[in-house]
Amino acid sequence: MTDQAPPAYSGPRRVLSGVQPSGALHLGNYLGALVKFARLQHEVETFIFVADMHAITVWQDPKLLAGQVREITAAYLASGLDPKVATIFPQSAVPQHAELAWIFNCVARLGWLDRMTQFKEKSGKHKERSSVGLYTYPVLQAADILLYKATEVPVGDDQRQHLELTRDVAAKFNHDFEVPGFFPLPEALTQGPGARIMSLRDGSAKMSKSDPSDNSRLNLLDDADAIAQKIRKAKTDPEPLPATLEELKDRPEAENLVGVYAALDGRTSEAVLAEFAGQGFGAFKPRLADLAVAKLGPVSEEMRRLMADPGEIDRVLADGAERARAAAAPILAEVRKIVGFWGA
Ligand code: TRP
């Protein structure tokens, strides 16, 4: 007998992702995550949550946390996520995440977590003063995903390593407990328009909520004046726009602004260049600002409307949490049996 590969997971496709409620959302989150979620919900069963349990791996003001959860939810809804189609919920309202995370803490190996680059970045020089939760953060993330047997996870490039760890946890669980194909080995969906929106001040750095310069990003709650001003101030070069993407290779800021235009307008960068070839940024930037205001204005307006009456958001979250708990329950019940817990 030769060694056979274990049977692959054969369940249905499911999409799951989450955003942490820590800091304002920006254009990169919108194009790289929220718009993608809204598109995927019509193709595959979709679970989208607010990762408040991940947020508290670093200090969060308890007076602000629930409000931040509502703000992310408002952004989800304003970006087109439909609570009748997708299941939208706060992570902490589904206690099964924590329960599965504990079991996975006993599956994942210290060596795996030691390799996680995000922990190294976030813990900085004083690793011993970081919370234990920050260290096991990727294990909770694996639980988030596998609790629903999600097969696809739309995330930024920076989450690839956490998805690898999720696959390692799934494979080791399936192997150690001799339940081949029980958990899927989920894939990161990192491609597509808006996958990599860069800082407006530095074309080599990702647009980020932790950048100290607010001019580096367009926040979803920026008003039209702020958007126009940030685009006017965006770093560029003196050359006119070329006709091909190839010629933008060594001009990261120019390439980024063309990419932002393309993603906002639902076109390719090539199509944008075909229109603007030969024009300088003096002409391009006002057009980009108009487009950004036209696309982001309605999103921030809807977010403000929703946040003015949190009742609607809270109903969405309560209903989503109930549906998420119901989806998680049978899977966790099986896991408890597989592990051999009393009464399972
Ligand atoms: N770690 C993710 C981030 O920073 C957030 C997250 C937590 C997540 N759990 C997840 C994303 C599960 C996708 C799936 O952005």
Image (cartoon, rainbow, N blue to C red):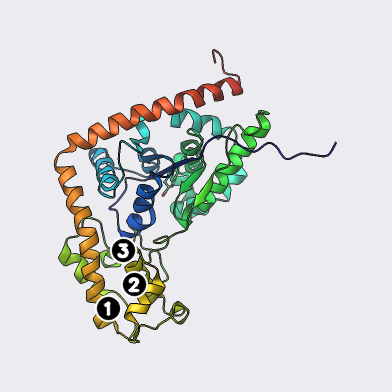
- The residue pinned by badge 3 equals 264
Residue displayed at 58% across by 43% down: 167
Residue displayed at 28% across by 50% down: 79
Residue displayed at 31% across by 76% down: 235
Mark earlier in primary sequence (3, 1) = 3
Q: Amino acid at mark 1?
A: Phe
Quadrant placement of the N terminus: top right
Quadrant placement of the C terminus: top right
Query: Badge 3 local density, few (<14 within 10 Å), some, or many (20+)?
Result: many
**Helix, strand or loop for disc 1:** helix
Q: Quadrant of residue 296?
A: bottom left
In this picture, is 254 found above or below 98?
A: below
Can you tell which mark lies on residue 305? none
In this picture, is 327 found above or below 305?
A: above
User: Can you name the residue that lies furthest to the top here?
Assistant: 343
Q: Amino acid at mark 3?
A: Leu
